[in-house]
Amino acid sequence: MKLKKRKIKYAAIFILCWFALLVFLVDGILGFQTLVDYFGSYASVEITLLLLVTLPTLAVYKFTKE
């Protein structure tokens, strides 16, 4: 698979913005400890947050036109 510069650029911009939004929501508004208490496991919250960042970024990379 050959990487395309334009697709990487758009995916990088998306991941930075999306990650910043999730950090703001989790640390500022929702509270990380509240999420851990709600889900019951630190690992499940971490994995969920990582998937919420990586999966949409991969989708942006895949569907960006060259």
Image: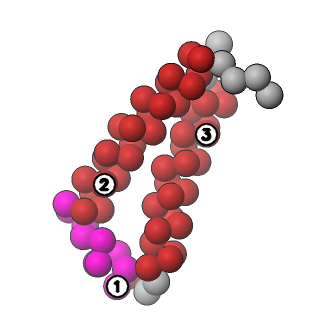
User: Residue 45's spot in the image, x, y percent?
Assistant: 45, 72
Q: Report the span colored magenta.
A: 28-37
Check contact, mark 2 vs mark 1: CB within 8 A.
Answer: no
Q: Main secondary structure of the magenta part?
A: helix
- Tell me if residue 42 comes above or below residue 11 in the rendering: below
* Crowd band around label 1 with a 10 angstrom C-alpha radius: few (<14), some (14–19), many (20+): few
Q: Nearer the viewer, mark 2 or mark 1?
A: 2
Residue for badge 1: 37
Q: What residue is rendered at 44% in x and 79% in y? A: 42
Residue for badge 2: 23
Considering the numbered disc 3 on the image, is that residue within a helix, a strand or a loop? Answer: helix
Can the viewer see residue 65? no
User: Residue 3's spot in the image, x, y percent?
Assistant: 69, 23
Kindly identify the amino acid type of the residue bearing the numbered disc 3: Leu
Considering the numbered disc 2 on the image, is that residue within a helix, a strand or a loop? Answer: helix
Q: What residue is rendered at 24% in x and 70% in y? A: 31
Q: Farthest residue in the top direction?
A: 66
Q: Which mark is residue 58?
A: 3
- Tell me if residue 52 comes above or below residue 43 in the rendering: above
Q: Farthest residue in the left direction?
A: 28
